[in-house]
Image: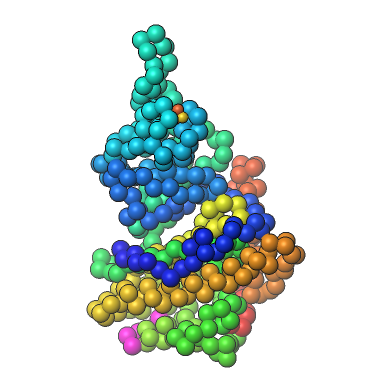
Amino acid sequence: MVSAKLPFLTTSEIGAPIQGPTATLLYDDWYPALRADKLRPGKLATAMLLDIPLVLGRRRDGCIFAMRDSCPHRGIPLSDGWFDGKRLTCRYHGWEFEPCSGQCALIPSLSSHDRLDATRIYATAYPCEERDGQAWVFIPKPGSGRATESTERRPLPDLAKFGTRYHTACLTADLPCNVDHGIIGLMDPAHGPFVHQAWWWRSRGSIREKTKRFEPIPEGFRMSAHAPSGNSAPYKLLGVYGEPVKTTIDFVLPNRRTETIRCGDKWFSSLTTVTPVTGSTCRIDVVAAWNVFYFVPFVTAIAKFFGAKFVRQDQVTMIQQAEGLRHNPSLMLIDDADKPAKWYFALKQARLDADATGATPKHPMSGPVELHWRS
Ligand code: FES
Ligand SMILES: [Fe+2]
């Protein structure tokens, strides 16, 4: 997977964290913490997910792990300690932990007079899996004790692939707004002609009326398979294959948008997630795979160049938006362009209610609907 240095603004360039309103966070689900190629045997990396500081690494046997970056003894960050590829040693009193389970293996200060069994002590370790080039971490509800059994967890998302030969790329950008604003920005159809104006994408004058069919799917909604907009240049390029182009876009809780474009045996697939870093900041990650233009030289570099410009346009807009949100304005959602955002909030509330009552989440859509907007 290619992952070059990208022209995104870093957290420090975004400026001091803008304390806008916080979002309610959804636990008991998987979130991407960082790119898995950042995890090298014997090295430690840190990340923040849902306000939880994490230390991540890769054991010598290849297994990756994520622990709360805090020693259960006195709370010093475990990332300040040492990792030999097998055990993580706290730098304060030298307690040693097996990092995948969090189990304490050794307390150096214990003497022959002590009865304490070090192996009954656990640092907090989270289920952690590598998939599609990302390290995914399962974040349980705070206070729910040791991690759930793997059978009780929601499944890890997969980037769809339709063959064995494909290119891949990924992008990451920090956003200074809370996860809800990041997500509704992701599914907002009306900002395209204003935020993403570019000769290679679309112009403001290219706005036209659109009708799209949506259908409910478990904990989400799907923009049913349709021919993509004729006013977007990248889609027009696919015309060279002379086959009908069909695109399907899904949104599924807690934060995932998947898009698949099929054109005969050619395809493009992406998984975009907006992950809460803290209650008031988030990060957008895009992983993509495709076999369209497979033999075009530098296709990955070209795709990353345009992909990065696109995400950067969203990022700059959200930095401006965060400036406005810091003063807690009242906001509005209109029909039909903001209908997907309304569904997102309803789906989220349904999951929160179901978590509280143990009932099955109630879906806000009773069946397929058509939405109309101009973009
Ligand atoms: S604080 Fe970590 S071993 Fe004491
Ligand atoms: Fe956008």
Residue 170 lies, in percent from the top left, at 38, 65
Q: Residue at x 72, y 67 (%)?
A: 331
Compared to residue 177, the image places residue 373 above or below, namely below
Question: Does the rendering let one see residue 91?
Answer: yes
Is 32 colored magenta in this rendering?
Answer: no
Q: How many marks?
A: 0
Placement of the N terminus among the 4 image quadrants: bottom left
Where, by quadrant of the figure, is residue 243 drawn? Answer: bottom left
Q: Residue at x 42, y 50 (%)?
A: 136
Where, by quadrant of the figure, is residue 112 drawn? Answer: top left
Residue 145 lies, in percent from the top left, at 52, 33
* Nearer to the camera, 144 or 350: 144
Placement of the C terminus among the 4 image quadrants: bottom right
Q: Residue at x 59, y 77 (%)?
A: 191
Q: Residue at x 60, y 77 (%)?
A: 190
Question: Does the rendering let one see residue 216?
Answer: no
* Nearer to the camera, 229 or 46: 46
Compared to residue 99, the image places residue 32 above or below, namely below
* Nearer to the camera, 131 or 99: 99
Task: Specify the segment rendered in magenta.
Answer: 240-245
Residue 40 lies, in percent from the top left, at 30, 49
Residue 279 lies, in percent from the top left, at 60, 52
